[in-house]
Image (cartoon, helix red, strand yellow):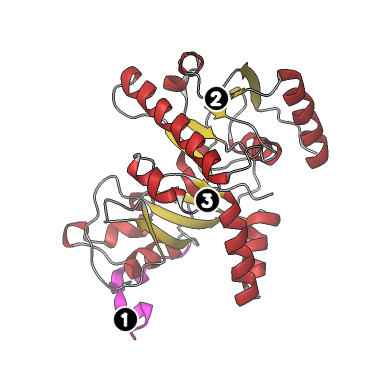
Amino acid sequence: MRTLEESVNPRLLSCEKLQGLKPLPPEQQTVIIVGWNEMIGAMLVELDKTVRAGSTLVIHSPVDKKLREEFIIKAQKRRRHNCDNLTIRHSEGALGARFLLEELPFAQADTILVLADKEVDDTNAADAQTLAVSVQIQDILRKRTDGVSPMIIPQLLEADSEDLARKSGILDYMLTDQLVARITACVAEVPQLSCIIDCIVKERSSRLCIRELKDYPAATALDLEQGITFDEVSAAVACANEVALGWSSSDPDEAWEMNPKERGQKRSWPEDARLVMLRKVEHSGLSTPISSVNATKFWVN
């Protein structure tokens, strides 16, 4: 097995490691949450930390507005965080009511989150409802927008629902229950991973983000026309003191390829390709916008 130094262009490794990237400034955004469950408290805090002041959050749910407001106040006290960057608006009504969904400002949204109804006894039925709402939103956006549509991220409870989501054209989703199980399994198998997970989830000293290859100065040494390898990408981002975890999949049926097995195999790099990165958090109030975080950003509190 070849080492990283043997796998990449020497010009790439000669780049100075002082090419750290400046953190992206937060953006003023409109986020829409369709649905309601106990996960909302942690999500609101994370959203508030991510967006710029003046951002708007619209929550549509059949749950009574007063109950939601009381829950949000208690959630902020519990986490000792006031959501000052978000202006929260509530919409009340059935999740699957098309005429109510059409009243929501989906066309102006940056991100749309569809939460699972955990009050439903059958988790498969809950996922079916979540995907049905997501498909309706897709259809509404298709008739309202020209060009780029906001990202729709449904919360799924069953792994079996992944295939149905892909067939519905939904490649970004949150498998929150599975995520907790997978983290537990990883730590049980390799206890040393707990310190890495703590940095991401607990200490918040590192975070996942999505970046373009051209964001990295060292990437100018790569010949994209001839194709690139994951080893070369890893070396380029290492010059900025970041870690490459995966990249856009070349398989049209998959959104991402994490930890590629064939790290030395060249592949084409289209303009819309992206990288999944692990980077150190700058404690200066600056952070990566949620629109560039996508489904790799999870709330597991």
Task: Please identify the quarter of the rendering in which residue 58 is found.
Answer: top right
Q: Which mark is residue 63?
A: none
Residue 269, image x and y in percent?
25, 54
Near mark 3 (Cα within 10 A), the count class, few <14, some 14-19 or many ≥20, is some
Near mark 1 (Cα within 10 A), the count class, few <14, some 14-19 or many ≥20, is few
Q: Amino acid at mark 1?
A: Glu
Which residue lies most toward the left here? 226
* Residue corresponding to mark 3: 158
Near mark 2 (Cα within 10 A), the count class, few <14, some 14-19 or many ≥20, is many
Image: magenta residue range: 1-17
Q: Is residue 171 visible?
A: no
Q: In terms of secondary structure, where does tag 2 sit?
A: loop
User: How many marks are shown on the rendered structure?
Assistant: 3
- The residue depicted at 64 percent of the width and 44 percent of the height is 284
From the viewer's perspective, tell me whether residue 68 is left or right of residue 286: right
> Contact (CB < 8 A) between labels 1 and 2?
no
Q: Is residue 27 visible?
A: yes
Task: Please identify the quarter of the rendering in which residue 136 is found.
Answer: top left
The residue nearer to you, when weighing 280 against 101, is 101
Q: In terms of secondary structure, where does tag 3 sit?
A: loop
Note whether 89 is above or below 293 in the view shown.
above
Q: In terms of secondary structure, where does tag 1 sit?
A: helix
* Residue corresponding to mark 2: 95
Spatial CA span between label 3 and label 2: 20 Å
Does the magenta run of residues contain 290?
no
Note whether 107 is above or below 8 in the view shown.
above
* Residue corresponding to mark 1: 6
The residue nearer to you, when weighing 296 against 230, is 296
From the viewer's perspective, tell me whether residue 209 is left or right of residue 223: right
From the viewer's perspective, tell me whether residue 85 is left or right of residue 127: right
